[in-house]
Image (cartoon, helix red, strand yellow):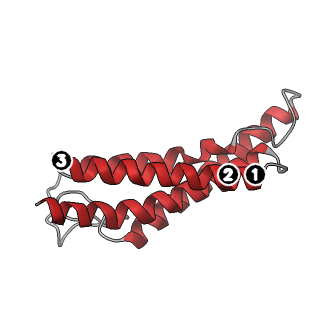
Amino acid sequence: MTEQRGPEQQSGFPRRDAEGRIRTLGDLLGVCLAGLVIGVLALVLFDWAFASIGAGDFGHTNGWLAVILPAWLFWDDFRAWEFGAARVVAAVVAAAVGVFAGLLIAGLGAGLPPLLSGALAAGAFTVAYAALWFPGVRWLARRTG
């Protein structure tokens, strides 16, 4: 049997409200960036392992894969919001700006190995998405009722 917790008794990180939404932008960014670092480290480990057995050169894995854990958290927070236009509009705008920021950074780092340029692009996407999603969905939810 699972223990039911009230909003004031809830423990864990990131901190969430009674509906399961992340409470603060700092929590969202902190967990997303930690997930990004874990993703990059996992990619470096796999890339090193494959390069050491001769299955390619080190640094040629796509660094964009590091965005998997932050995207999972974004999806979880998206699901915590009530069904409605506010969450969809906020997610679409944040994703568009995040992809643009990521592609811009990837383009500026075109001379770098794909692992590094993709990881930097994934970081830009993560920060841009979180910075727009968190205040955007709250503002739109208040405006639409």
Q: SS at mark 1?
A: helix
The Cα–Cα distance between marks 3 and 2, rounded to whole angstroms, is 33 Å
**Which one is in front in this view, the residue at disc 3 or the one at disc 1?**
3
Taking depth in this image into account, of 106 and 58 the one nearest to the observer is 106
* Quadrant including the C terminus: bottom left
Q: Nearer the viewer, residue 112 or 42?
A: 112
Q: Position of residue 85 (x, y in %)?
A: 21, 48
Q: CA distance from mark 2 to mark 1?
A: 5 Å
Q: Earlier in the sequence, mark 3 or mark 2?
A: 3
> Residue 12: percent from the left, percent from the top?
34, 64
For residue 119, the mark is: 2
Give the residue pinned by disc 1. 116
Mark 3 closeness class: few <14, some 14–19, many ≥20 residues within 10 Å: few
Q: Quadrant of residue 36?
A: bottom right
Q: Residues within 10 Å of mark 2 (few under 14, many from 20)?
A: many
CB-based contact (under 8 Å), mark 3 and mark 2? no
Residue 142 lies, in percent from the top left, at: 17, 66
